[in-house]
Amino acid sequence: MERLPGFRDFYPEPLPHTDVWSADARQYIFDKWRTTAKRYGFREYDGPPLEPLELFTTKSGEEIVGQLYNFKDKGDREISLRPEMTPTLARMVAAHERNYKKPIKWFAIPQLFRYERQQKGRLREHFQFNADIIGETDPAADAELIALLIATLRSFGLTADDFVIRLSSRNAWQDFFKHGGGGHAHEYEFFQIIDKLERTPPEETEKKLAVMGFTLAQVTAFIEAGQPTAELDSILQNLAARGLKDFVKIDYKVIRGLAYYTGVVFEAFDRKGEFRAIAGGGRYNNLVKLISGGKVDLPALGFGMGDVVLLELLKARALLPKFDSPMDVYVLVEDEALRAVSLKLIHDLRAAGYAVEYPLTPSKLDKQLKRAQELKVGFTVRAESDAYVRIRNAKTRDEVVAGIADAANHLGKL
Amino acid sequence: MERLPGFRDFYPEPLPHTDVWSADARQYIFDKWRTTAKRYGFREYDGPPLEPLELFTTKSGEEIVGQLYNFKDKGDREISLRPEMTPTLARMVAAHERNYKKPIKWFAIPQLFRYERQQKGRLREHFQFNADIIGETDPAADAELIALLIATLRSFGLTADDFVIRLSSRNAWQDFFKHGGGGHAHEYEFFQIIDKLERTPPEETEKKLAVMGFTLAQVTAFIEAGQPTAELDSILQNLAARGLKDFVKIDYKVIRGLAYYTGVVFEAFDRKGEFRAIAGGGRYNNLVKLISGGKVDLPALGFGMGDVVLLELLKARALLPKFDSPMDVYVLVEDEALRAVSLKLIHDLRAAGYAVEYPLTPSKLDKQLKRAQELKVGFTVRAESDAYVRIRNAKTRDEVVAGIADAANHLGKL
C-alpha cells in the first residue's frame, strides 16, 4: 500500500531511499525554530489541524476552496484541513486576548495542507514556523519580528552572504498609487500587477498599468529609487542598532499576493536567487477584527517559514549536520551468565541520562563490536563480573575498570 | 467563529480559560517522551496524517469506517485522517525494512483522529506516543519495550505507587481456550468476552461462556491463579533484573479489544483506578505481513500512550511543573537616548542563548519593573551609558556594573 501523493514519510537517518524525508532533519529544524523563538520572547501555541471551512473563506474568499482539503464531516459540518495558521491564530487571540499582556508574541509549528489538483508531484503538506506579534502598531514590533526571522536563519549557520530580507510596504505603494492618481477601486488589482512584475512580460504589464493611468517607467523608477518610508526607515534603524544592517534591504518589488496585508511586507530570499522565498510576512492589522466579526480589533504582524525550501537551502549550502545514530553507549554482553547484571547496568546508565543500546538476544562478541561501531557510540561498557565493568572510550581507546554501580560516573570522566 | 467540537486549542500558560489546553504542558510531555525514547535507543519517524482509507480497513475491517474522519479527496481518492499510527508504521517498515538493522526500534508522536458521532463533548483528536520494536520474536524485546514504557512514566515523577503495568498474553488465553475445548471459530468472540468482563454483569458473561462450553468460575480461577506462561515469566525476570519488579504484575483480565494482537498484551493503569488506561500495547506479529500484502513478514510489538489521560493523571498527582514565562532577562530601557545601545545589548544577550524581553516602545520605568516581575525573569539589565550596564539578580538582588560588551559573561556569574 502506498502513501498518498504529495505527502511525506519521515524516516530515521541514514535514509533508505531518495523518495523519503529525514525525521532527524525535521526535528533539527523544529528545535532551532523553537529555541530561537523562545530567546526572542515568543511563546508556543497550537490549534486544531481541522477548522470550520468558513474560517478560511472569511479571510480569503470562496476562491480559496479550490486549493483546500475540505470536506463535510459526519455531522454535516463544512470543514477543512488548515492551509495556513493565521486564521486560527486570529480566532484564538480574539477568543482570549484579554488574558494576555500586549504585545502578544506567539509562535507555532503547524503542518499545513493544500490540495492543488493541477500540480502533480508537488507537496500537498508542509510544516511552517509561524511567529506573530499582536497588539502593537509601532514599527518597533516589525523590527523585533524581522530580527527573529534573521536570528532563526542564522541559527542554522546561514549568513548575510546566504540570505537577505527584502523589505517593502503596502503603504509606500498606496502612496505611490494615490499620488499618481490611481482610484481606490483599482488598488488591489494594482498590487497584483506589482506582485507579478518579475514573472510578466513588460508589454503586458505596460498595458495593464496604462488602464490605471501609470507607465512601467514610473513603476520601475519608484522601485529603483527604493526610498524608504518613515516607517521603513525606523525599522532599518532599529535593525542597524542591533547590528543587522547587512541582512535587510528595501525592495519594493516585494508586495506579496495575499489580500490581507496592510503595511510592511517582507520576504527572505537566498542571495544567489536559486530558491523560492524562504520566508514571508508582514502586517495584517485588520484580520483579527474580520475573524472576530468586529468584536476584537488588534493590529498584528507575522511571518511564515516553511520546512521544504529551508531544507533545500541548508542542503545546498552544506549546513545540515550529520544525523548519525545518537547512541552514547553500547553495552556488550559477552557472557550470558552476566545478562541479568548487564540489564541492571543498562537500566542505570539510561537512568543517568545516557542513550544506551545492547544486544537484545545472545550474539557473538565480534558482531556486537561491529554493531557498536555502526552506531558510532562514544563508549562500550562490558560487565566483567557482577561487581566490575570495563569502560572503553571508542575514540581515544582509553579503558578503565570501575565498580558496576559507579559506571555512569566514570563515563563522564573518561 | 468557534473551533470544531472535540478539538483543542493550545495556549501559553497561564491558561486564559478552563476550556483550553496548555501548549506548555503539551511540549513538556512531548519532550519527556522524546528524551526517554532516545535513551532507550528508539529513533523517531513520522508519516502523513492522511492515509488511503484502505490502510485502516485492511487492518481493522470495514466496521472502523464509522469511527473515522474519512472522505473523498478532489482526486476521488477514499482517504482518512489517521485514527492510529500502527498501520502507517507497518506500511513504512514494509517499504524500506531492508535498509535498517533488526530489531528496528522506532517511536513517533502523531496526532490521531476519531470521529465518534454519539459521544458529544468527547475529544476527537489526541496525541499519542507510539514506540515499537520490529523484527524480534524473543520476549527480550517485550521486556525492553515495557522497560521503556515504565521509564517514560517515571520520567514524569510517577512511581510504583502511582501506576502498574498489567501484563497478560493472548497465548495464555488461547491455551486456556483450547485446553477447555473451545473451537477456533469462537476464539475472537471469547477474547471479546474476556475484554468486557469487568464491564458486563456476571449472569450475562456466564450465559455467553456457556455457549462455548466454559463457566465463569473456570475463567475467574484462571485469572486469579495468574500463572505466568514461560514467555511472561521470561519478561518478568528480565524486568526484575533491571530493578523493575514492582512496576509490573500478571493480570489476565487484560486482553485488549483489538483483533490484531498475537501474543503478549499489556496496559498501564494508575494504582488508584481513577483513570482509563494510561497506555496499552502488545505483540502484533502478523500486521506487517497483512499490510504489505504478504511481501514482508516481520514480528512486531508496540505500545501507545495518549496525552489526555496522562495529563489528567499528572495533574491529579500534582506532578506538572509550573510553566511560568520562561524569560531569563528583562532589559530595562530607562533612557530612550540609550534605546539603540539597548537593542544591541538585547541582541547580544539573545545571541549568547538568553531568553530576553524588553519594552518594545517607550514606557515608564515602574511599568517596566512590574513587567519584569510578572515575567519572573532571573535578571534585569539596564544600559547606564553606551559603555556600561547594570545587571541585577532578581532573586538575590545582587547588582554588578559591567562593560556592555561583557554583559552576557557576567550574567552567568551573578
Image (tube, coloured by chain):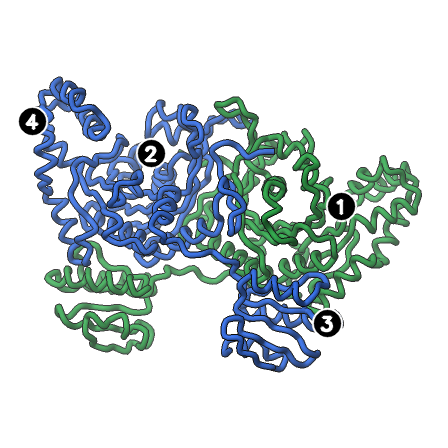
Chain colours: A blue, B green
Q: Position of residue A287 (x, y in %)?
A: 29, 35
Give B28 or A90, whichever is nearer the viewer.
B28
User: Mark 4 or mark 2, which is nearer to you?
Assistant: 4
- The residue most toward the front is A366
Q: Position of residue A168 (x, y in %)?
A: 18, 40
- On-image quarter of the C terminus of chain B: bottom left
Q: Which residue is mark 1?
A: B262
Q: Which residue is mark 3?
A: A335
Q: Amino acid at mark 4?
A: Gly
Q: Position of residue A193 (x, y in %)?
A: 20, 26
Marks 1/4: CA–CA distance: 76 Å
- Check chain identity for marks 3 and 2: say if they share one: yes
Q: Residues within 10 Å of mark 4 (few under 14, many from 20)?
A: few
Disc 1: host chain? B
Marks 1,4: beta carbons within 8 A = no
Disc 2: host chain? A
Q: Position of residue A372 (x, y in %)?
A: 59, 64
**N-terminal of the two: label 3 or label 4?**
4
What's the mark number on residue A291? 2
